[in-house]
Image (cartoon, coloured by chain):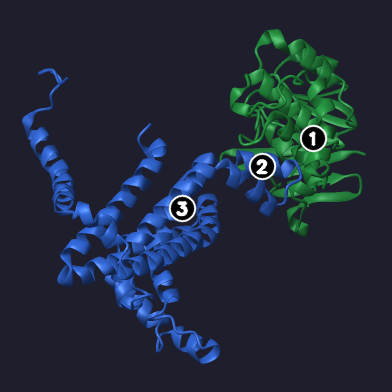
Amino acid sequence: MTLRIDGTLRRGDLTLELELELPLGITAITGPNGAGKSSILRLVAGLEALDEGRLTLDDAVLDDRAAGIFLPAERRDVSMTFQQPRLFPHLTVLQNIAYPLRRKGHTAAEAARLAQPFAERVGAGHLLDLRPHRLSGGQAQRTAIAAAMAARASTILLDEPLGAIDETGTTDIRRLLLDLDAPRVIWVTHDPADAESADHHITLGLP
Amino acid sequence: MITPSRRPPLAILVPAGLGVALVVVPIMGLLQRAPWSSLVERLASDTVVEAIRVSLVVSIVAAVLSLLLGLPLAWILARHDGRMAGIVRAAVLVPMVLPPVVGGTALLFALGRRGLIGQWLDAWFGVTLPFSTAGAIVAATFVALPFFVTTVEAALRQAGTELEEAAAVAGAEPVTRLLTVTIPASRDALLAGVALAWARALGEFGATITFAGNLAGRTRTLPLEIFLALESDPASAVAVSVLLLGVSLAVLLALRGRWFSR
């Protein structure tokens, strides 16, 4: 169950040469701004494609331009949270958490029932019927984390999940993130303490 | 209350005031000539009721077509910045600046019985668009579509790709993303686009009379009815004009939240 990135990503001025193994467990990625931390998550999620080289999961190739292979995001067994939480503005908190379950074919009622425990786990149990514009930054990120958990993907990608939350509220979320059920968690963070608590740690330098 | 220090200089105030007058005075002129006492009766006359029916059918179908064709188009234009997208955008916007009578003429030579495509429509399907309600719908959609596309493209562009990415990672296929995220999240812009397209279709005159003609019960919409009645029954023409003025103001009011409150 090893995820490997071995290739090059070019975005404007930025050229990232990557040779990474992302094993099971929690891998923390740290490094300065512009080093490409978010780009690694986007590559794994299928939101970006490598310009050269390949991304593989064990024997399966997910991305290889030369071979004409690219598995799009919706077909990958991955869920993700973003630095600024991306909640669907027309859906309630519970419906946002249920969204990935709906995509797996659950009915609305079933998805809502399955989503509720995740809302409670992140401490959003009292917010179920609110729409995102009524939430604080921390509440929105908790909702996004619950949605990422509800998808039950085997890889969860966290892009600075605590960045949008003020200091006081982070302790319990940090504990929650270290205790996710997903086999593989990739956690981009600025905080050396998070990197300490992770199973593996990758530090990126500026390219 | 305008205090002297806040009042704009005369050199600005005078042309601005003339600009307002240019719009307001004709409306006052219309309202002053309106046959208020017989308004309802005139609007209920057989010919007007028939024109209202044609106008509603034509403008509503044109607005729905603008939505069905314009939404995918607006989405593609908002998400692509290449040369091709630029050319397509320019082409779609042409009817906004084209004299409608030129649009009607173009439609005639494209879709008329002897037109580029019209001859095949006639030969293969027995479809003749000119002088039919379907032709009036085509003409109205031709002029209304760009209003929908520009409104919705701007909104989709502003909304960005962030939510669509989040939906993709959550397992939504492209069409599902459009239906479950992009469309509901930009509902206000879609409604505004439909309202603008509908209002434009309702007022359409030049392309309709050129391409679809002026047949009572089939292609004679309210603007055509006004044009015809001006000769024979000016009071009725004014009555119908007041009706269309009222509808236009209602559309403007409905869009108010979008445009005026910023």
Kindly indicate the quadrant of the structure image that contains residue A1.
top right
Colour in which chain B is drawn: blue
Q: Looking at the figure, which quarter contains the C terminus of chain B?
A: top left
Q: Residue furthest top?
A: A168
In terms of secondary structure, where does tag 2 sit?
Answer: helix
Q: Residue furthest bottom?
A: B123
Look at discs 3 and 2 and give the one toward the viewer.
3
Question: Which residue does the numbered mark 3 point to in the structure image?
Answer: B194
Question: Which residue does the numbered mark 1 point to in the structure image?
Answer: A112
Kindly indicate the quadrant of the structure image that contains residue B148.
bottom left
Residue A164 can be seen, yes or no: no
Give me the chain letter of mark 1. A
Question: Which residue does the numbered mark 2 point to in the structure image?
Answer: B165
Residue type at numbered disc 3: Val
Picture coordinates of residue B38 (x, y %)?
A: 22, 57
Crowding at label 2, few (<14), some or many (≥20) Cα neighbours within 10 Å? many
